Image (cartoon, grey):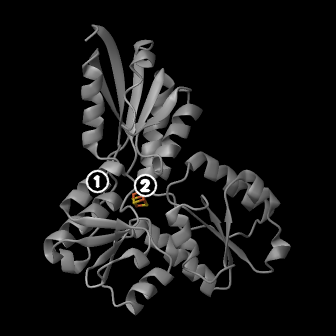
Amino acid sequence: MTGKKIKIFLASPRGFCAGVDRAIEIVEKSLKKFGSPIYVRHEIVHNKSVVENLKKKGAIFVEELSEIKDSSRPVIFSAHGVPKNIPEEAEKKNIFFIDATCPLVTKVHKEADRHHKNGYQIILIGHKDHPEVIGTMGQLPVGSIKLIETDKDAQNINIGEFNKPLAYVTQTTLSIDDTMNIIEILRKKFPNIKSPIKEDICYATTNRQNSVKKIAPNCEMFFVIGSENSSNSKRLVETAKKFGCAKSELFDFSNSLPINQIMKVKTIGLTSGASAPEKLIKNFISALKKYFEVEINEIITSEEKVTFKLPKFLD
Ligand code: SF4
């Protein structure tokens, strides 16, 4: 303890969203109902500590169904969603599957499906190679969905390519502001483009970004607790930078705290991505308390009451 004081602006809401809560509960209840092992295709949610904890309880994580050694055991699909060919493959192999796709991702899948049935060419705004994007694109035949990632991609789209009316959908965990720019470009180019009835960026992403926007201007450093492969956590770092805190970073406990840098500041912002458990926030604060006299100022920008039902057989 150095006797130095530090003020933490703690964002709220932060951490687990309803989709992550549900996905983890699905794995835990499946382990209870069916015993171990249970296979999980892809990290159930993008957080190392959650995955490690479930491994200890008997979950085996695989990337593809071909890695499953015992096809008599159930497999759970992650919260990010899967392309349609994955449940089809499980059925062919007689593997019992449980789908933990977040209902808000399923909403985007259904939306894309509806547009496709109504004869639209779909534009998906998202990040290439993210499992949610792979899952959404895999709902429809190849070519039905065109992925764009940037303003430039939106500017370069040529309607002549499609010869169909256009509709867009988005990944659920994008930056609200960056996506708004891309949508504006699309709307200017294609005034008749069909938008989602309710925006696809989910409530949890929106609320977590809004709380960071409020806090970031008052902070000299900002830490987002979350894993490198967590899209929504990375967007929180970008948001903090954009809204006034240049020294913002993702912290996943793989390195020790940058105490020397923290020594130089008096205020830090703190939040966690939608897949990061609250105990990591507690661990972070406890680690700081070894060096500093810590004052915590929790800034609540909205209340969250969203919950999602479990599959009936696990209730
Ligand atoms: S971040 Fe949003 S879309 Fe993703 S699991 Fe959570 S609630 Fe669902």
Which residue does the image show at 47% across and 41% down from the upper left? 210
Q: Residue furthest top?
A: 3
The kind of residue on which mark 2 rests is Tyr
Q: Residue furthest right?
A: 160
Whether disc 1's CB lies below 8 Å from ligand 1 is answered no
Residue 305 seen from this side: no
Whether disc 2's CB lies below 8 Å from ligand 1 is answered yes
Question: Residue 80: x, y in percent?
Answer: 44, 65
Q: Residue furthest front?
A: 69
Which residue does the image show at 50% across and 55% down from the upper left? 173
Secondary structure of the residue carrying tag 2 is helix
- Quadrant for ligand 1 reads bottom left
Secondary structure of the residue carrying tag 1 is helix
Disc 1 marks which residue?
52
Question: Residue 148: x, y in percent?
Answer: 68, 61
The circle on residue 203 is: 2
State left or right for residue 178 relative to residue 25: right
Label 1 near label 2: C-beta < 8 Å? no
